[in-house]
Image (cartoon, rainbow, N blue to C red):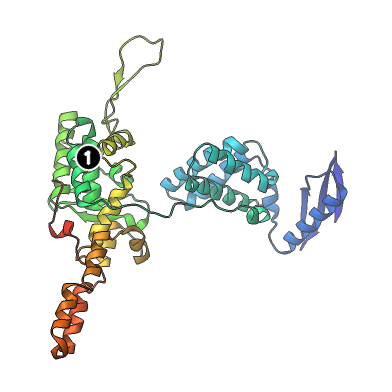
Amino acid sequence: MALYKRGKTWWTDFSMNGMRYRESLDTSDWREAQAKEKELITQASQGKLAVGSQQFGRMAFSNASDLYLVEKMPYLAPHSIQTEKERLKPLKVHFGAIALNRILGGSVRQYVIARKAANLSNRTINMEVACLARILRRAKRWHLIAEEIKPLPERRNVGRALSCEEKITLIDVARKKSEWQLARLAAVLALNTTMRAGEIRALQWRDLNVVQKTLTIRRSKTEAGERVIPLNEDAWAAVLELRERANLLFGSQPDPSWYVFPHGEGQGPIAKPKGRPGPAVSVKPDPTRPMSSWRTAWRSLTRVAGLPGLRFHDLRHHAITELAESDASEQTIMAIAGHVSPKMLTHYSHVRLEAKRRALDALSGGAKEEVTTQGTSQNSDEIPQVLENLVDVRGFEPLTPCLQSRCSPS
C-alpha cells in the first residue's frame, strides 16, 4: 500500500485479495489521509469497496444518475422509470457537476433544508433522498453517511372517507358547471370502482365490455392492480355520458384505441405570449393521448362543495371503506381494489365513526336490557347470539345508515 500526492491532494494505492484500488482521499492533511486509507482498506476487506464502484463514484452526479437510469430500465416498469426521472430532476439541479465521492452527510442535509424551504412535503423530500441513496449505494458511498441522514416525519393519515351527505353534495355541485363535467365523471368512476386517478386516465374504449358491463384495467401501479371490474348502475351511466361526449367532440363512435378521457379535453383557451397577434387558441382534444390532469377543476369543485383539501385519491379510500362496511368478503374487496394483502386493505379502509358507534351501542341499551330482563331463566345458548349480532362472520362492523339506506349520488 502507498500514499502519494497529486498536486496538494493525497491518494491511496493498495491491493486487497488480488484486486488493486486507487482512489483520491480528498484531503491535503497527511494524518487525515492515513485515517481515510485505513477506512478504505477495511471496506475493501469487507467487500464494501468494488473496483467498478470507484470509477462510478468519481463521476459527476448528473452523469452518474443518467447511467443509473440506463442500468435500472430492464428491471423497472415504464411508470417507475418516469417516477425516478421526476425525482432526479431536483437532485440534478442541486448536485449537478459534484462527484459522487464528494457528496457527504452535510451535503445531503443542505439539500433537505433547501427543499423544505421550497415548501415541499416531507414525503416528497424523503423519496428524493431515497433516490439519492440508491445512486450512492451503487457507488459504495451511502453506508459512509447513512447514520447521519434521518428521514423526515411523514403524515400518517392515509386518507379520508366521506359521509353520505358529503358524497351526494360533491356530485350534485359538480353538475352545476359544464367545466366540472370531466371531474364529476371521473369521481363517479372512482367512487363506484375504487379506480386510481392514473387508472382512469389510462382507460381506453377497448377496455370497456358493453355486453358484460365490465372494464379491464390493463395498466396499474402494481401487478395486482391489473383486474376486471363489473360496473354498477352509477358507473355505467358515467360511461354512457362519456361516450355521448366523445360522439359530440369527434363526430363518430369512439375508436377502440382512443382514450376515454382524451388529452386536452376540458382545457379552455390558451393565451398566446405577449407580442404575438391573434386571439387566444383552444387546445384541440386528442383522443390518441390520455388526459394529463383534471386538477384545476377538482380544486375549484371541492372548494365550492365545502370540501377543501379533499384529494381525488380519497374517493378510492371512500369506496374501499364502503366495501369494508358491506357484506363483501376480504377476497372480493381485494379483487375489486387490486390489493395484494389484507394488510393493504386495512391500510386503505376507514370504518366510519358511525359504524363504530353502532357496534359499541349494541354492547349496552337494548342488548343489555334483553339479557338482564330474562334473569336466570335465560338460556346460555342465547348469549352467543347477542355477540353474533355485533360482528358478522367476516369480522366487519354493522352497516352504517348510509349503506343501509343505499344512498346514491345519482
Q: With 259 as the anchor, is 125 left or right in this view?
A: right
**Vertical relation: 317 (above or below) 66:** below
Picture coordinates of residue 277, whole percent (x, y) = 35, 9
**Vertical relation: 227 (above or below) 396:** above
Q: With 48 as the anchor, is 327 left or right in this view?
A: left
| Residue tagged 1 | 184
Residue that appears at 84% across and 54% down: 34
Residue that appears at 24% across and 39% down: 305
Residue that appears at 15% across and 51% down: 213
The answer to which image quadrant residue 248 occupies is top left
Secondary structure at numbered mark 1: helix
**Vertical relation: 149 (above or below) 112:** below
Q: With 14 as the anchor, is 281 left or right in this view?
A: left
Can residue 45 be seen here?
Answer: yes
Can residue 260 be seen here?
Answer: no
**Vertical relation: 266 (above or below) 122:** above
Q: Say which amino acid is labelled 1.
A: Arg
**Could you tell me how many numbered marks the image carries?**
1
Task: Please tell me how crowded label 1 is: few (under 14), some (14-19), or many (20+) other residues with Cα within 10 Å.
Answer: many
Where, quadrant-wise, is the N terminus in this rendering? bottom right
The answer to which image quadrant residue 271 occupies is top left
Picture coordinates of residue 145, whole percent (x, y) = 66, 53
Picture coordinates of residue 85, whole percent (x, y) = 49, 41
Q: With 34 as the anchor, is 328 left or right in this view?
A: left
The answer to which image quadrant residue 44 occupies is bottom right
Residue that appears at 32% across and 55% down: 225
Picture coordinates of residue 50, whole percent (x, y) = 69, 56
Q: Nearer the viewer, residue 194 or 115?
A: 115
